[in-house]
Amino acid sequence: MKELYLDCNMGAAGDMLSAALYELLTEEEKERFLAELLGAGIPEVEIKAKPGVSCGIGGTRFEVRVHGVEEESVDVHEHHHHHGEGHHKDHSDNDHHDHEHMDDEYHAHDHHNHDDQPHHDHHHPDYEHGDHGHNDHHHHHASMADIEHIVSGLKVSEKVKSDVINVYKLIAEAESSAHRTEVSEIHFHEVGMMDAIADITAVCLAMEYLKPERVTASWVRVGSGQVKCAHGILPVPAPATAWLLRDIPIYAGDYSGEFCTPTGAALLKYFVNGFGVMPAMKAERVGYGLGKKEFSAANVVRSLYGESEAGLPKSEETDQVVELSCNVDDMTGEEIGFCMERLFEAGALEVYTVPIGMKKERPGTMLCVLCRETDKEKITYAIFKHTTTIGIREKSYDRYVLDRSVKEMSTKFGTVRIKESTGYGAERKKAEFEDLARIAREQDLSIAKVRELIGIL
């Protein structure tokens, strides 16, 4: 199966995603891709794809200019901020997050320059553009109906048109939710709108060229801090981005600024099937889509394209879990057992205890709970409620699990459920214990004899 994996450890923006996918194409495909993108007829837009380097890693930067102007974004920083030329001071020790979007012959630029703010400022209805020195093009607005009209006239396949409109609808829905208004009332600034259409069209067209059967991605860095908009100062991720990233695993990371834009978030939401660590695959091609700013880490979206190993688990079976643990020495075994029941009810994946030695040579118990990030807060409350601990430790782990399923097998004693697990070259079958116990009681047999009779251990 052809698999595409997107490494979003430095966030996601339309220009970075399109550049990362562009890099996966063959030289002949790149030529055709750029020609088709440039000939698509996106009004007043120039697109370039230029080679560049971030932390010594070579990749591609996509640059999009609308009316000859490339949008800038505005971040609010702890000390001060100034914009222009994409040099914004960060809260962290890094100097500038100058995310240079690519310059090649093709302009696909997202509202995310990992500079202070992603270039998503362009299409956000609230983003303030006046300080950028661009003049009146920023005052032209368009509705979702106008966008659909523009996209319907592009010289690309009907599949690409449909994908572009569907991605933009996600952005419109996000803006609608953020502003608590109808989608029909949302209007986009012209420059930001055309910039986003270019980015989205580039990604949708690249997907048509690559035709991955499955798309997966890492957890997404969103950054931290604040963004300056026309209506005031908003937290990062911006409301529209946060809405789009619901049910997607995200984290702030150690750099301030906005790392995931609405355009990037919408593209991930639309195309990605699962989020987690890299799946088992044979990568045939690797690409790097460069951002505008420079950090101590390579500012890239990395793409890997290749064949998934037959029989190995898909990425949704490879996830990240949180371990919460605490030590207690003043609870009875019955109390600990009751606590374990409550923790499973609260959504714990695993709960187990380890005998330990504590201060003053007292014997104690370490309680360990594995859970998903989304259940961490609920599990933390449950641990404090049902134990005597005054502190909880936390660790994060990557978890590799086999692909599991339950099948029913007919036997002379009735139906027995069989749990099957496969992957990583392993195959296991196990009869459901409750079914074995039922038969043992009914037939007055031992569990071992029932397993022997039905032929499943």
Image (cartoon, rainbow, N blue to C red):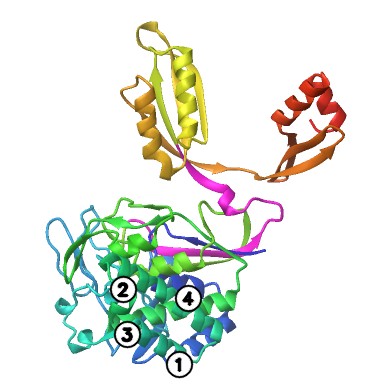
Residue type, numbered disc 3: Arg
Q: Earlier in the sequence, mark 2 or mark 4?
A: 2
Do the CB atoms of the residues marked 1 and 2 lie less than 8 Å apart?
no
Q: Residue at x 45, y 80 (%)?
A: 165
Which residue is drawn at the image coordinates 32% and 81% (left, top)?
A: 193
Q: Which residues are magenta?
A: 296-322
Q: Residue most toward the left?
A: 80
Mark 4–mark 1 distance (CA, rounded to whole Å):
18 Å
Q: Label 3 belongs to which residue? A: 65
Q: Is residue 265 above or below residue 371?
A: below
Query: Real-space Cα distance between discs 4 and 3?
Result: 17 Å
How far is mark 1 from mark 3, CA to CA? 20 Å
Viewer-nearest of discs 1 and 2: 2
Instruction: Name the kind of residue labelled 2 in the image.
Output: Glu
CB contact under 8 Å: marks 1 and 3: no
Marks 2 and 3, how far apart in space? 30 Å
Q: Where is mark 4, residue-wise? A: 203
Q: Say what secondary structure mark 3 lies in.
A: strand
